[in-house]
Image (spheres, rainbow, N blue to C red):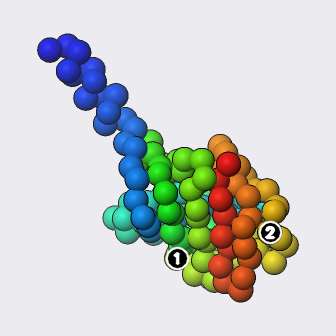
Amino acid sequence: MVFLIMASMVLSHAQSKTTKETKVILVVEGTSDGIAQMVLFNTFEKMKSKEIYVKFPNCQFYIGLLQGRYEVEEDKVIPSKDSTIIMYTEQHYLSGNTLLSSDGFLAGDQMNLGSGRAKVISNKKGELILKTQ
């Protein structure tokens, strides 16, 4: 019985999922040259804007899509290696200010993605495509 309780606690802490596409919010902090973290879009929709700015001060939010396998730990989305992330650089969530300009990224460039790294696959107007490493 104790084993079942402990197992359920571990399973509820981090959920692993595979999906064709998942809508996410990419959080860019300050003048960072990368993405601080990803959060499920549904999680952001449930929060009030004031609550979001308290939780993520000095951040900008971009809408994106995640294709592939990922885990959710607390509110953070952690993509597995070789997952694809499409960041819509002209689709801001809550604000129109730009902290991360995609103009400087070329195919093959590396960038921070939470605690991991991602490689730029393509950079077209309004769409930055990344592959996790």
Task: Measuring from the top left, give residue 95's x and y in whole percent.
Answer: 58, 79
Q: Nearer the viewer, mark 2 or mark 1?
A: 2
Comparing 70 with 33, the one in front is 70
Comparing 7 with 41, the one in front is 7
* In the image, farthest residue toward the left: 1
Question: Which SS class for mark 2?
Answer: loop
Mark 2 Cα-neighbour bin, 10 Å: few <14, some 14–19, many ≥20: few
Task: Measuring from the top left, give residue 24's x and y in whole percent.
Answer: 48, 65
Comparing 101 with 95, the one in front is 101
Label 2 is placed on what type of residue?
Ala
54 to 101, vertically: above or below: above
Residue receiving disc 1 = 94
Comparing 84 with 28, the one in front is 84
Task: Measuring from the top left, give residue 5's x and y in whole percent.
Answer: 21, 22
Question: Which SS class for mark 1?
Answer: loop
The answer to which quarter of the image holds residue 40 is: bottom left
Residue at horizontal 40 percent and vertical 59 percent from the top: 19
Residue at horizontal 32 percent and vertical 33 percent from the top: 11
Left or right: where 119 falls relative to 49: right
Left or right: where 40 falls relative to 107: left
Residue receiving disc 2 = 107
Residue at horizontal 81 percent and vertical 63 percent from the top: 108
82 to 21, vertically: above or below: above
* In the image, farthest residue toward the top: 2
130 to 95, vertically: above or below: above
Q: CA distance from mark 2 to mark 1?
A: 28 Å
Task: Measuring from the top left, give residue 56's x and y in whole percent.
Answer: 56, 57
Label 1 is placed on what type of residue?
Leu
Left or right: where 130 falls relative to 67: right
Residue at horizontal 72 percent and vertical 67 percent from the top: 121
The answer to which quarter of the image holds residue 99 is: bottom right
- Are the residues at dot 2 and dot 1 in contact (C-beta closer than 8 Å)? no
